[in-house]
Image (tube, grey):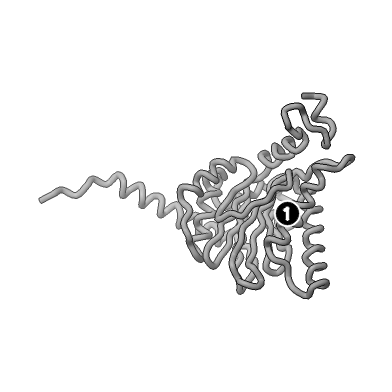
Amino acid sequence: MARYDRAITVFSPDGHLFQVEYALEAVRKGNAAVGVRGTDTIVLGVEKKSTPKLQDSRSVRKIVNLDDHIALACAGLKADARVLINRARVECQSHRLTVEDPVTVEYITRYIAGLQQKYTQSGGVRPFGLSTLIVGFDPYTGVPSLYQTDPSGTFSAWKANATGRNSNSMREFLEKNYKETSGKETVKLAIRALLEVVESGGKNIEIAVMTKDKGLQQLEEAEIDAFVSEIEAEKAAAEAAKKAPPPRET
């Protein structure tokens, strides 16, 4: 194996590109991120690592705008994410200048995935060590979309998905609990998925909600805590209902 994991453009005899697989491993060690698409709302949530006391926590953002109607969350190497985000933003603005129309979510997803794939097939570079969740509303139809890309350059559309640390646990939770929701219920589903893998409740969670009219809005810590309290109260009520003895027949 050692001979085949040094050059990015060389396949191993069993068909592996080890550098791409190592990049996927970097994603799996990154912060957890989740995206949920509702009927009128799209929610992005990420795990927030605790910041040093003297650091301004607002300077570390893992959910960002690419355009007025498109946002991105990522898991993996933050420095790689910054480069990819800047390239995507420039493409969004170039598209507006060239054709005088905003990009669709699928268009910018294809662009980001193409850029990631390019870095798996060129000598002298390495793959981007990050996976992205891209959300937005179609500027022509108003339909919400959620896409995921990974370091190999593949992309796909989802109703709800997770990436990063313990993404399998979150994905299993979403598969069991996902249903078409709107408004606050979509936010609660995303937070519940993150709470499956994140400790300390709302303190370590960053949530952003996108609607067609208001665009992307980052929730304040107090708002997230209110949602977490509501979720915990619902969970406690459900457990109490399970433990309650069945009513006697008269």
Which residue is depicted at the point 71% across and 63% down? 65
Give 200 or 72, whichever is nearer the viewer.
72
**Circle 1: is it few (<14), some (14-19), or many (20+) Cα within 10 Å?**
few
State the residue lying farthest toward the left. Answer: 250
Counting from the top left corner in percent of width and height, residue 220 is at 60, 62
Which residue is depicted at the point 83% across and 30% down? 6
- Tell me if I can see residue 226 in this picture: no
Q: Is residue 177 shown left or right of residue 68?
A: left
Give 245 or 7, whichever is nearer the viewer.
7
What quarter of the picture does the N terminus occupy?
top right
Counting from the top left corner in percent of width and height, residue 233 is at 41, 54
> Quarter of the image holding residue 165?
top right
- Tell me if I can see residue 13 in this picture: yes
Which residue is depicted at the point 77% across and 29% down? 12
State the residue lying farthest toward the right. Answer: 124
> Quarter of the image holding residue 58?
bottom right
User: Residue beneath label 1, please?
Assistant: 60
Circle 1 — which element? Answer: loop
Which residue is depicted at the point 36% across and 50% down? 238
Q: Is residue 96 shown left or right of residue 245?
A: right
Q: Amino acid at mark 1?
A: Val
Give 151 or 60, whichever is nearer the viewer.
151
Counting from the top left corner in percent of width and height, residue 200 is at 56, 46
Count of labels in the image: 1
Q: Is residue 175 above or below residue 188?
A: above
Q: Is residue 12 above or below residue 111?
A: above
Counting from the top left corner in percent of width and height, residue 148 is at 65, 52
Q: Is residue 70 above or below residue 9?
A: below
